[in-house]
Image (cartoon, helix red, strand yellow):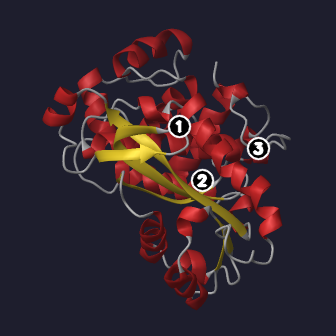
Amino acid sequence: MAGVKVKGVDDLFVTTDIHTLLTALYVKIDDWLGKPRRTGRPPKLSDAELITMAVAQALLGIRSEARWLRFLPTHLPGAFPYLPGQSGYNKRLRAALPLLKKAIRLVAADTDLWFDDVWVTDSTPVECGRSRPTVKRSDLAGWAVYGYCSSHSRFFWGLRLHLICTPSGLPIAWSLADAKADDRQVLAAALEEDPALLAARPGQLIIADKGYISAELDRWLAERGARLLRPSYRNRTPRSGEHLLKPVRQLIESVNDTLKGQLDLELHGGRSIEGVGARVAQRLLAMTAAIWHNRATGQSLTRSLIAYDH
């Protein structure tokens, strides 16, 4: 990727394949980062190359970092002139969490979907361990806890990914919280952390499930010009528009299925707070990049990863 000499990405949106997407993404990130500000010898693997490499790993579904570094020279020859060792790649990836978060926003905001006036939100389990010895000795102890997944009627030990996205699956905001955290509180905290999201979108509609029922949350959102639409309890009078909720709410389940079924969200392999965060961000960026590229090439299935998983 380091040898690419392109000033923009418009000419790169020609076909939908892994090579085209990675090249376009690399140019986009490299243009955004510009020249490194730090002094001294530049790293052999640039930040733009690191992010591109992380996206390629997630799209191709190779969870083992050691296997991924063995895979690259044969299947993507010349794409990355320098390949670090497994420990070096792991260290760089964990340290790149803030950069991955910014890259998700950068790529997402570069699509027309970013301005969608409807959002859907939900949380999904991110399991971090199963055996009791793992739970006791894990560096995640104290952050990860036992929670219950009603969709699969099972308990799990780990975290929850709270995602706010458009109906097409484009991430708007996300956060990781312990498995017992209140969905309503996490939603408010995520939006409060980035007040510009709602300030720039008066009248924004957010669709959620019954877990977000709260008069306090409704008032909090109304003060910021947003409205939350979710099903009412059976003993309550249905609110206006509730009959339209079911098909839209199912979209967030489809997004979670993409993250888990195709991008192996629950098989992240993270063993520390930074490790889990980076690997979740890696998968969110991979999905965002696919949506971005599919949108630019006029694909009918915006969130399809089929063209990039081989």
* Amino acid type of the residue tagged 1 in the rendering: His
Which of the two discs, 3 and 1, sits closer to the camera? Answer: 1
Pointer 1 local density, CA inside 10 Å: few below 14, some 14–19, many at least 20: few
Residue 90 is left or right of residue 125, and the answer is left
Residue lying furthest top: 74
Q: Is residue 41 visible?
A: yes
Pointer 2 local density, CA inside 10 Å: few below 14, some 14–19, many at least 20: many
Q: Secondary structure at mark 2?
A: helix
Between the residue at mark 3 and the residue at mark 2, the CA separation in whole angstroms equals 14 Å
Q: Position of residue 276 (x, y in %)?
A: 34, 41
Q: Are marks 3 and 2 in contact (CB under 8 Å)?
A: no
Q: Quadrant of the C terminus?
A: top right
Q: Position of residue 225 (x, y in %)?
A: 63, 87
**Between residues 260 and 56, which one lies in front from this camera angle?**
260
Tell me which numbered mark, 2 or 1, is placed earlier along the sequence: 2
Picture quadrant of residue 95: top left
**Between residues 193 and 57, which one lies in front from this camera angle?**
193
| Residue that mark 3 sits on | 302
* Amino acid type of the residue tagged 3 in the rendering: Thr
Residue at 46% x, 57% y is 102
| Residue that mark 1 sits on | 152
Q: Position of residue 260 (x, y in %)?
A: 54, 34
Residue at 64% x, 46% y is 253
* Amino acid type of the residue tagged 2 in the rendering: Val
